[in-house]
Image (cartoon, helix red, strand yellow):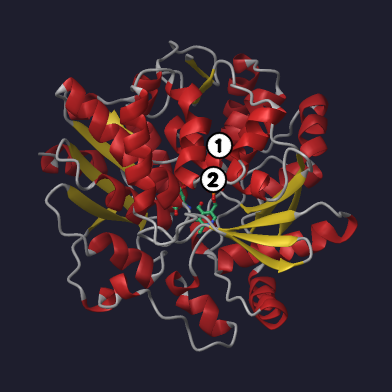
Amino acid sequence: MRYISTRGQAPALSFEEVVLTGMASDGGLYVPEMLPEFSREELADMAGLSYAEIAFRVMKPFVNGEIDDATFKRIVTEAYATFNHDAVVPLKQLDANHFLLEQFHGPTLAFKDVALQLLGRLLDHFLKKRGERAVIMGATSGDTGSAAIEGCRHCDNLDIFILHPHNRVSEVQRRQMTSVLANNVFNIAIEGNFDDAQAMVKASFADQTFLNGTRLVAVNSINWARIMAQIVYYIASGVALGAPHREVSFCVPSANFGNVFAGYMAYKMGLPVKQFIIATNANDILHRTLAANDFSKKELAATLAPSMDIVVSSNFERLLFDAYDRDGLAVAALLERFQQEPTALADAPLAKLREKFASYSVDDTTILEAIRDAHKRTGEMLDPHTATGYWAAERARADQSTPMITLATAHPAKFAEAVVKAGFLGVPLPPHMDDLLEREERYTVLPAELAAVQQYVAEHRR
Ligand SMILES: Cc1ncc(COP(=O)(O)O)c(C=O)c1O
Ligand SMILES: N[C@@H](CCOP(=O)(O)O)C(=O)O
């Protein structure tokens, strides 16, 4: 198994190399040259296995023998032992055919833990084996940051720099990052938005001279290992609800598109999926593109679902690569146009996407309505991101008898503002975060300027 760039001009990499990098040198993202496929029998055999065992089976072909089976199994088992639910991502039935896939039982209460508990351990494994150090630069709209810090902070070979948009993440999210006072963890509050932070991280991959030869590694979903780990829960939840013998659909609160793209990979690997519903907040580029072929930037809006306040959706590039029949040059040309001016997809790729994907955009008022409605109908308290998915799924499934699995991407305790605005008293933090709001914080505020950020990283890395 080799990994190739979505823009077709960068060297192919091994699994180890792809884990230890970020973007491809041509500005693209890495994807497997060929996807492994599971037969119906192999899928059926996974029903009833532990999450760690399914994870091992699903990810083994991607690892390609570059980690021996016993070691990889240990890494996977340790990663998922950090979750406080035996099922890791349990399914909760809301009604006859609507299910929530609860992805917030990890250490930092959002779906990012599923991949980052694994990625931290993979980085530790490969860096120790090589006797190398590395610098992590990550951009976060609130959830990736704490999950990356939690997943990687025990790796002494890593210095972790996380950029979050100043005053645009929830208090709980900020404190989850800034109260980690380890000497290899550096939080930078950017005077800008998530897109600014993500652009600076990507620019740092494109020109790494400021690091004088030290390796730069990504923890965002531009790193293929993030997607790989996220494929697992689609397969695990699908087989739990009867796949491959029946189809399932998924509704995914989406922004940077890593989560739903992982679902699409699961489908391409053999999981029978009828449809993917993409739910966005008011930052609706994914919805506009699918519904109206309007692939254009719009000013970023601050919403009640702040982790999805993203305009430039990184992983959409991976889907475009597939939709454009893996023509890297066509993808590169489209994305260069997109950076300059409003653009549109060609007819054939758009038609291909519409075969499998539908989309909804959910504004703040509707998010609050969805939180209230879900609570009244099912007794569940949803976080505002999950609420976008719940609302979209309820609309989308009106014409479907297929089980609908809505991804519950975060715990409501992380987003008190929305919960209170919806008319509730709030949700307590779990015991391991009881004193979060009293913990000491450490972070540095910087302007949204690449030179300032790179200078900070160069000066502070150990
Ligand atoms: C809680 C939550 N839900 C949904 C999303 C959207 O996921 P993705 O960026 O993979 O589309 C994010 C982050 O982007 C998130 O933090
Ligand atoms: N919502 C994310 C944004 C970054 O997405 P990623 O999946 O590419 O890491 C966050 O919470 O930081």
> Which residue is label 2 attached to?
256
Q: Is mark 1 within 8 Å of ligand 1?
A: yes
Which quadrant of the figure has residue 267?
top right
> Which residue is label 1 attached to?
315
Q: Relative to 418, is 365 on the left or the right? A: right
Q: In this view, does 68 lie above or below 437?
A: above
Report crowding for label 2: few under 14, some 14 to 19, many 20 or more residues within 10 A (C-alpha). many
Numbered disc 1: secondary structure: loop
Q: Is mark 2 within 8 Å of ligand 1?
A: yes
Across and down, in percent, residue 277 comes to 73, 50
Residue flagged by tag 1: what amino acid is it? Asn
Numbered disc 2: secondary structure: loop
| Quarter that holds the C terminus | top left
Q: Residue furthest right?
A: 399
Q: Cβ–Cβ below 8 Å for labels 2 and 1?
A: yes
Across and down, in percent, residue 145 comes to 35, 52
Q: Relative to 353, is 436 on the left or the right? A: left
Task: Residue at 65%, 63% (x, y): give it.
Answer: 388
Which quadrant of the figure has residue 130?
top left
Across and down, in percent, residue 346 comes to 77, 26
Report crowding for label 1: few under 14, some 14 to 19, many 20 or more residues within 10 A (C-alpha). many
Task: Residue at 44%, 74% (x, y): give it.
Answer: 413
Residue 341: in sight, yes or no?
no
Across and down, in percent, residue 19 comes to 36, 28
Q: Earlier in the sequence, mark 2 or mark 1?
A: 2
